[in-house]
Amino acid sequence: MPVLVLLIISLFIGPYAQATTLLSIVDELSLRALESTFDAMKVESLLDGSGKQLTMSERRSAAVLVSAGILRPSDVDDESSVITAFERFKLASIAKNDHLMGPFGDAVTLSRLDKIGDHQELLKEKNFINSLHKLLSKGVITGYDLRKANISAGFDPRRTLTYSHSSVVHLKQLNALLKSENINGLLYAAPKISAFLFRDEWGVPGDNVATLKDGTRVVNGREWVVFFEFDTAAAKHDFHQVVTRYAKKDDENEQGLIADSWWQPFYYSETNIEGFEHINLILLRSDTTEATLTVLRDKVESVTAALSDQSLDMTIEDVWVNKPFYRFLQGGYK
């Protein structure tokens, strides 16, 4: 691989990228002795045809890292993929691992979903919340989510969807539903606070609707941010099909849905999915918390201009959302 390309990769993915090799990763993770237990047949089975260009020593190291879950066989043929996977593993120790519930459909996952945690730490962010409410009053934004800073670090964007919901019962049922549909992966969940503008066509405001000083009505919610990390990238589309059929309400009294299904389920991908719509995710970060704003692409410039006086770190990401939520961003109800 050209030196210039490696330099660009190094600058992009951070400090762990410097000359990282299969052998040095194995040493850093203290897995060297494990290599001696891997014969040629086991190495070949684990690598599944990948890594033909490597020496036998490197192939054994690669097989060890595949068995440890650091690499996938498809990563082995490309040095930049190896580096990226190891960087992702490092990031996972910062945030991702704290919120692991377990595999889809596993009894331990069902049990842990009852113990996700509460929203008290997020509710203490009074100054941050007040500043976000001012933006709602001015019409700069239509809503936001508040969650732990850098909570999405370490996930593989090719295989991960970020989902939101206010009902743990819904999440428990969705977790089991995915397994019943032969969709496999790991589920991660954590508290988040949401707020968005109340719309007159929704009828009589509920107890969760607050009126700000200027009369702006805001729906406040205590929700959960959920990361579904699938075994394969293709499973993201399968997930979308399952949610559309069993977890999206199209009629008020619709039968055959899991509990607490929404008119407009909210989930997004950091990679494009056929049939999804391209929007932007704006992140405002403090030291401990981040607010995420879902914004239509033609609104990004005006929103960022209005946020320019905020003393918060701001980044803009490309994400893709399902069509029902895209309609919500455009002002639709169902």
Image: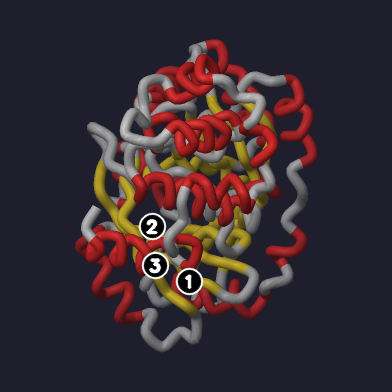
Q: Nearer the viewer, mark 3 or mark 2?
A: 2
Q: Distance between the residues labelled 2 and 1?
A: 12 Å
Q: Disc 2 designates what residue?
A: 294
- Identified at 53% across, 61% down, the residue is 218
- Compute the Cα span from label 3 to label 2: 9 Å
| 310 to 250, vertically: above or below | below
Based on the displayed image, in which of its 4 quarters is residue 327 positioned? top left
Tell whether label 1 touches label 2 (CB within 8 Å): no
Specify whether 273 is left or right of 163: left
Asked whether residue 119 is in view, the answer is yes
**SS for callout 2:** strand
Decide if residue 315 is on the left or right side of residue 177. Answer: left
Q: Which one is in front in this view, the residue at disc 3 or the one at disc 1?
A: 1
Q: Mark 2 is on which residue type?
A: Thr
Q: Give the amino acid at mark 1.
A: Leu
Q: Residue at x 40, y 47 (%)?
A: 201
Residue 126 is left or right of residue 283, and the answer is right
Which residue is located at x 54 percent, y 18 percent? 42
